[in-house]
Image (cartoon, grey):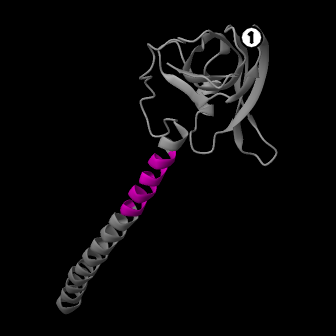
Amino acid sequence: MKKLLGIMVLGLLLSGNAYAETINQRLDAIEKRLEKIEESLSGIEMINNLLNTNILDNSSKSKNSTKTNKSKLDFKLKQLNCFDDTIGLEKIFIRYQITNNYEKKIKLVDATLIANDLLGDVIFRGKISRDVYLASGRVDNVEGSYDDLMMDKCRRIKSVEFPDIKYVLDVSKIAFEDNTVIEF
């Protein structure tokens, strides 16, 4: 009986050493996976910079919350919500009205819509349509959609009632019919 008990204790001790080795192997494998994730995140950061959206900002605090529309464009956000497209992916739907208060026809506008909740947290940030082609004094109603594949903004947009959305149009450049460009 003592021999049997001794063999069982010895077996448990040896099996513990065997498991310790596999735990180290598991930790190495986890470290390799984390390195791959970090590499893919650096790719997402590059895409983020190209799209001028803030995918990786977990705090969602607006760094541009004090900016105002310094141009003579009048911008009114009419609708901001989410829907599922035909293949089941979420899309952000936006509808707005833009008015040209300049004396010249506008061809192109480089501007970003920043929508915040009442506390100033960014719930949506996206470029508006560049191709405006709007005569002086004219109004245009524009609709568009954005894929919400990696931004995961739909969850936040759905949680905020539309009247509680505060928005700013951050205009960078405007190109006119005579090919002059003004920057803000």
Q: Where is residue 128 in the image (x, y as percent from the top left)?
A: 65, 27
Q: Position of residue 64 (x, y in %)?
A: 44, 20
Which image quarter is the N terminus in?
bottom left
Which residue is depicted at the point 45% across and 57% down?
40
Which residue is depicted at the point 82% across and 45% down?
86
The residue carrying pointer 1 sits among few (fewer than 14), some (14 to 19) or many (20 or more) residues within 10 Å by Cα, namely some
Which residue is depicted at the point 45% across and 22% down?
62
Q: Residue farthest to the bottom?
A: 3
Let me know if residue 5 appears in the view. Answer: yes
75 lies left or right of 141: left
Q: Which residue is nearer to you in this view: 139 or 151?
A: 139
Judged from the image, the secondary structure of the residue bearing numbered disc 1 is loop
Let me know if residue 115 appears in the view. Answer: no
Which residue is depicted at the point 52% across and 12% down?
118
Residue segment shown in magenta? 34-47
Residue on which disc 1 sits:
136
Q: Residue farthest to the right?
A: 86
12 lies left or right of 125: left
Q: Where is residue 16 in the image (x, y as percent from the top left)?
A: 25, 77
